[in-house]
Image: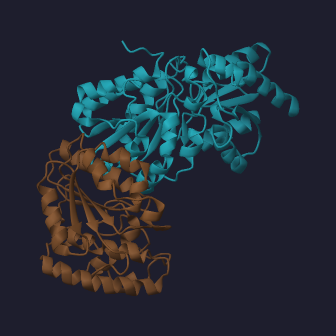
Chain colours: A cyan, B brown
Amino acid sequence: MIDLSSQREVLAAILEELGERLEDLAVITADVGKSTRVYRFGKKFPERYFNVGVSEQHMISFAAGLSMAGARPIVVGFSVFLMRAWEQIRNSLDIMNLNVKIVGTHSGFSDFADGSTHQSLEDISLMRSLPNMKVVVPADSIDIQRSLPQIVESVHGPLYYRIGRDESQVITSGCTYKFSLGRGYVLRDGYDIAVVGAGPILSEAIKASDELKKEGVSVAVINLLSIKPIDEELLEKYARKTGRIVALEEHSIYGGVGSAIAEVLARKYPVKIKFVGTSTYGRSAKSTKELWSHFGLNSASVVAGCKDLLKSSK
Amino acid sequence: MDIKGGGWRSFSLDEIEFISEKAKKTLKEMSKYDEHIHLESSLSSLKAISTIILGYWRDSDNPIDRDWFILSKGHAAPALYAVLAEVGLLDKKELFNINKVGSPIQNHPDLSIPFVGMTSGSLAQGLSFSLGISAWIKVKNGKGRVFTLMGDGEQDEGQVWEAITHAPVMRLGNLTVIVDLNRRQLDGSVHEIKPKDYMPLVWKAVGWNVIFCDGHNVRSIAHALENALASSLPSVVFAETSHVDGGC
């Protein structure tokens, strides 16, 4: 039985399963095989598992070369340290539109104890700016099970897949949607405000929606899941329907999910947007949720954001 | 420009020497059309390029059975273009359009050019990329071999260390790297900026088969490549060259 509360456990189980079916699948990591759990793929398929040592830049160009020779590489690393290889991602990989999937683990505040150097809050922004790169951010382990196998099997080209570590609350188990790149999904319907975001932080949006419901405010919660390409139609629909958007992300508000939403709505149907995300570096704490509260990303911040918007647009 | 299906042939070393001399003239001519060409660095790499692609490179439709040429020092691309034009794989007139927007002939090479296995220009990445190709060929028991050309200035990149310590671990005997020792880097002499004399010792220490040759002599280069191809270790050839006029 897979531990559904741990994103990395689910990741490892999926890669093992895909390895059975796909003979060209290769997994590459940079001395974080144990921390990301993908060493299990290596135990099963030692020839197709490459631990390159603590060498993130080399890892990316190396994976690009594997792809050029016919492999289907999955790079797995801490999202924060993949950023040091951004230029390799650009020049060894994206520029040739090579079929390499990059899984960034321990994203956002999920590596709570290790502090600011280990907490990636800028990765979506960096990856999103690359012309061929696609970006997917699953909300929970069920979302990973829904989307990752399909991405590996049938989405061609470079794609950044951002996951957390453990402690991910399952929030989409009741949903019946199937993953489709470029589609977003309604987790809660509502008509006063739409909270739009991606990743485990959406659990706080659900909580906020429940709280506001008691006060008679109807809050929709949208799981974007695919940040690039993004579901323009769904964003426009909810902008028209509610007239107010709260963008929620476990990431910098500069260039991240909120910015992606704003880029669409500025063109399609401009409405007021409240950006809930980070604008500074993280720090060590005892839990991820403690950091969400500390940096104003919790349900209380979402509730406050919703109320601000309601006030200003009355 | 598609070389596949046409049947690629190997040239004799005398023919390669002759073609290289003609290509050298073409290259100097090209530099009159665009001042941004990295002429010195192209001249010093010219014979290593011509010896690999005209003397050794083997084709196949299967990516693990064909040979690969990775120009990690992408700024030597004009030398590659000049050689390709001499053997009819590029239109010589097109060479003089270098860096005109719309021309496939650019300062750094992309995948549209015959023999180019990687869009390159950012230093050291071609080395890691080559390891990836070599590793997959080895995993799949392919016949392909990988030839990678680097500069000596390029040795400054930290990624070189990340890559050279990895290749021997995987015992990539199908990988041959040539380092063009022209003793120059962008800002001037390597001796003034960061000496490179210890580099062969570094590569040797981490497990490479280290070979030296005269980078302006096709026979010397070929001799080194034979040695490299016979080794079960990854090989590096340090090719002594002169930046002044390509030494030819």
Q: Is residue A69 visible?
A: no
The answer, for residue A285, to whether it is visible in the render is yes
Which is more toward the observer, B132 or A175? B132
Image position of B224 with respect to A222: above or below: below
- Number of marks drawn: 0
x and y percentages locating residue B191 in the rendered image: 43, 64
Relative to A244, A138 lies left or right = left
Where does the image place residue B168, in percent across and percent down from the top left?
24, 43
Quadrant for residue B40, please give it.
Answer: bottom left
Residue at the (43%, 48%) spot, across then down = B158
Left or right of A271 in this view: A117: left
The image quadrant of residue A197 is top right
Residue A82 horizontal/vertical position (percent): 48, 39
> What residue is rendered at 49% in x and 47% in y?
A133
- Residue at figure coordinates x 45%, y 50% from the top left: A88
Vertical order, B48 against A15 (above or below): below
| Quadrant of the frame with the N terminus of chain B | bottom left
Image quadrant occupied by the C terminus of chain B = bottom left
* Viewer-proximal residue among B243 and A183: B243
Q: Nearer the viewer, residue A156 or B165?
A: B165
Foreground pick, A92 / A17: A92
Residue B229 image point, x, y percent: 14, 57
